[in-house]
Image (cartoon, helix red, strand yellow):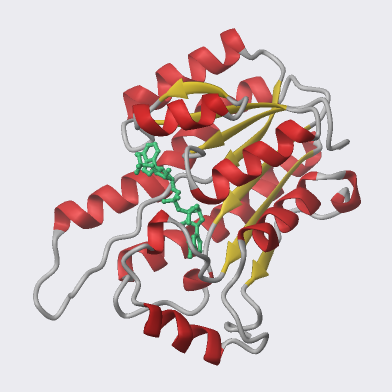
Amino acid sequence: MKLTGNTILITGAGSGIGLALGEEFVKLDNRVIVAARSPEKLKVAKSKGLETLKADLCEAGSIQTLSRKVTQEFPKTNVLIHNAAICKLEDLVQGSSPAVQEEMIATNLLGPMRLNDALLPHLLKQPSATIIILTSGLGFVPSAFYPTYSATKAALDGLTRSLARELGPRQIRVNSVAPGYFDSDMVSDMAEEQKRRIARRTPLGRLARIDDVANAVHFLTSDQASFITGQTLVVDGGITC
Ligand SMILES: NC(=O)c1ccc[n+]([C@@H]2O[C@H](COP(=O)([O-])OP(=O)(O)OC[C@H]3O[C@@H](n4cnc5c(N)ncnc54)[C@H](OP(=O)(O)O)[C@@H]3O)[C@@H](O)[C@H]2O)c1
C-alpha cells in the first residue's frame, strides 16, 4: 500500500502516539479520521488538520454509530488503526475491582473486536486495506501492577494472528505494534525514578520515543511490508527480549 492517498481511521488519536501518527499521515497526504470521546481532544486533533468523529470505544452502541458515520462520511476508509486504550493500576492482593477490569477489557479488547466486526464488510470492498493494532511489551512480559491491561494486550496479539489468517486470502494484512514505555498521558503518573529504572533495564538504554513507534506503524502500513501479516513488531529497545 502506498503511504499516500489513504483514508485512515485511528481510534483514540486525540493525544499521544495516535495524534502523532495522525499528523504524520496527514503530512504524507492521507486523510485521517480521529475517533475519540473527549471534546477537548477532538478539538486538538481538528486544529491539526485531522477529521474527527466522537465515539466512546468502550460502548458497543457508540461503535455501531461510529462505523455508520465512517462508511457514510468517509467511504474510502481503507486503513484501521486500533490505538485507544486505558491502563489502570491494580492491586489484586488488596482485592480486585471487577468494574476496573471490565472497563479495561471493554475498551482495550472488545473495542477493537467490535469495531473490526462493524467495519469489515466495508474494508473488504476496498481495493487495498490493512489493520494495525497497538498492543504493548506488557503483553509479552506482563506487569504485576497491570494484570488486566497486560492480559488485554496479549489477547490483541492473538487476535492479530487470527485475523491475519482469516483476512489474508482477501489481501487484508493485519499486524500489531507492541511498544515499550514512552512518554504520554497514559504514563504521566510514572515517577521519574521509575522511568530511569526502566531505561537502565533496557538494552538500548532509554525509553521508546513516539517516533520509534510511529516508524514501526508506517513500515507495517506500507508496501515495504507487503508480505508481512499476523506479526507483532516489538518496539521496546530490547527490554522484553
Ligand atoms: N505510553 C506507553 O508507554 C505505551 C506503552 C505500550 C503500549 N502503549 C499503547 O499505545 C497506545 C496509545 O497510548 P498512548 O501512550 O499514546 O496514550 P494516550 O495518550 O493516553 O492515548 C490513548 C488514547 O485513547 C483514548 N481513549 C481511551 N479510552 C477511550 C474510549 N473509551 N473511547 C475513545 N477514546 C478512548 C484516550 O482518550 P481519553 O482521554 O478519552 O481516555 C487517549 O487519547 C495504547 O494502545 C497503549 O496501550 C502505550
Residue at the spot 77% in from the left edge and 45% down from the top edge:
221
Residue at the spot 38% in from the left edge and 85% down from the top edge:
193
Q: Is residue 34 left or right of residue 177?
A: left
- The mark total stands at 0
Q: Is residue 175 left or right of residue 113?
A: right
Name the one closer to the observer, 230 or 27. Answer: 27
For the question of whether residue 37 can be seen, the reply is: no
Residue 40 screen position, x and y as percent: 37, 31
Residue 228 versus residue 24 in the image, above or below: below
Name the one closer to the observer, 152 or 27. Answer: 27
Residue found farthest to the left? 94
For the question of whether residue 123 can be seen, the reply is: yes
Residue 174 screen position, x and y as percent: 69, 47
Residue 97 screen position, x and y as percent: 13, 61
Residue 24 is drawn in which quadrant?
top right
Name the one closer to the observer, 42 or 166. Answer: 42
| Quadrant assignment for the C terminus | bottom right
Residue 110 versus residue 146 in the image, above or below: above
| Quadrant assignment for the N terminus | top right
Q: Is residue 176 left or right of residue 68?
A: right
Residue 123 versus residue 224 in the image, above or below: above
Residue 82 is drawn in which quadrant?
top right
Residue 209 is drawn in which quadrant?
bottom right
Residue at the spot 45% in from the left edge and 88% down from the top edge:
197
Residue at the spot 55% in from the left edge and 59% down from the top edge:
158
Residue 190 screen position, x and y as percent: 35, 72
